[in-house]
Amino acid sequence: MNKNKLFSRKDEKQLAMLGIPCEVALGQVENFRKGFPYLDITKPATVGQGIIRLESHELDKLIGDFDGYKGKLTKFVPASGAATRMFKYLFEFIDDYPKKKEACFNEKGFNSIHYFFEHITKFAFFNDLEKELQKSGVSVEKLVDEKKYDIVLKVLLQPYSMDYGNLPKGLIKFHSYPEGARTAFEEHLVEGAQYARMPNNDVYIHLTVSPEHKSGFIKLAKEVKAELEKTYGVNFYIEYSEQKRSTDTIAVDINNEPFRNSDGSIVFRPGGHGALIENLNDINADIVFIKNIDNVVPDRLKPQTKTYKKALAGLLIKYQSMVFEYLQLLENGKNISLDFLHKVLTFTIEDLCIVPPTHLDRDNPDELLSYLIGRLNRPIRVCGMVKNEGEPGGGPFWAKNSDGTTSLQIVESSQIDLKDPQKKALFDAASHFNPVDLICGVVDYKGAKFNLLKYRDIQTGFISIKSKDGKELKAQELPGLWNGAMSDWITLFVEVPIVTFNPVKTVNDLLREQHQ
């Protein structure tokens, strides 16, 4: 493809300003034209077949192993998402209520406006809402009695008041305590103090934030940091990063030509959470905990979260130590026997769940040595998995890779050809769900940081249809952070209790028992 045919000099200047190499943009256009291949899943990962179930005595041992760890820890929290979708049906109510009035309350389910107002005093942000209304001499109760429900929601959501509709989830008050309410961000600080503290009591928290919300996080951190440090006996070091503009992806029209603004410039769109592998790659740490911003619980439920986070980190350290020991022997040893190579191969198959390609000559010492070093000298992740209770999204599977190996992968439904009855049956048979609960070992056996960008599968992107200025466009997301962006990592799956997974997708989720 001749780049001068597709991109003008003006286009090339725009690409340069964004830090996007011309060949990368060309590759993205080619992805639109060819499409992304489906992942070849072979079976779901289940307990005993790719998913580890830890017994209580194992938990204690692994926690002990982790407590003695001396490396640098960081808690990584993707926190850029706005809470707009969390309040979607409240915005819809504001639009509908002037016309439909009481008919808006016909639905009585959990995620209904009726349920919201019936339990409004239970929200952690209720006191702030009441104070905001009192400035105008009214109360929630008075407005509800007068059936001015839309006024209550406008004060909660719109910019001239509390502006919850434009805040990121991290700055929304999630949980109530006698001493006051805590935001999701504050809950992550408290969690970090409980399982990500180092022997010197330092706790490193890294949040990926949107540029427009960064100042809000910094302001809140200044307000609460000292008191939380005193309460938990830690020193917080809070870092922020933004999704890099160089990870934006080109948009195209229905003919797969660059989609352009009215001034002729090319439209680029954020590359999705997979872009955050760049942010993760920049972190200076040995072990990184990853957890979504909205998956937090009140203090009374934190003990199990702490237990399993530390146990998963202990398991990572256990397997990482074994991998490092084998690598030192393989790379530094002389006259390595074929029997020893077969022992290491068995470890990669039975413990690390990496099935070698059929063409591997297991009796050729040189070929086997090269294969084993290549398989072992990679970043490692331990991923918590919860039993599937109908949540949409990705799950744990065995899948064939482009190099001929079969390994454990977190797979999204968009990566599977669900029109193929066999693949759909495999997908539907999954027993577990991915709650985004990861512990990542990102240094090699010599202590050097891995370049995480080398371990992505760039063929696991996703194409969706969007619109701009009334015209249809195609958008492209990069390989997801915990699937394609980590495709070539050593992966271990561990069953964790469902109580450790409590995301807040809609505002009424905050009324669930787990958030009260």
Image (cartoon, rainbow, N blue to C red):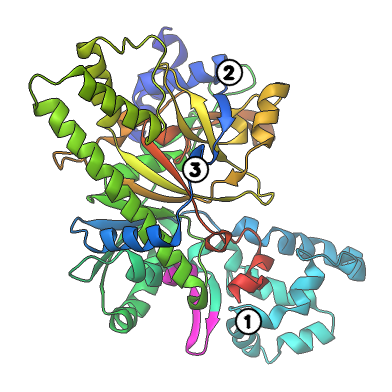
The correct choice, above or below, for 24 with respect to 153 in the image is above
Q: Which mark is residue 126?
A: 1
The correct choice, above or below, for 360 with respect to 224 in the image is above
Q: Quadrant of the N terminus?
A: top left
Query: Is residue 16 shown to the viewer in this render?
Result: no
Give the mark nearer the N terminus: 3 vs 2: 3
Could you say which is closer to the camera, residue 497 or residue 381? 497
Q: Quadrant of residue 251?
A: top right
**Label 3 is placed on what type of residue?**
Ile
What's the distance in space between the residues labelled 3 and 2, CA to CA? Answer: 41 Å
Q: Which residue in the structure is indicated by mark 3?
A: 51
On whether residue 179 falls in the magenta region, the answer is yes
Q: Residue at x 55, y 14 (%)?
A: 34
Give the mark nearer the N terminus: 2 vs 1: 1
Secondary element at tag 1: helix
**Label 1 is placed on what type of residue?**
Phe
In this rendering, position of residue 477 left or right of residue 320 = right
The correct choice, above or below, for 34 with respect to 200 in the image is above
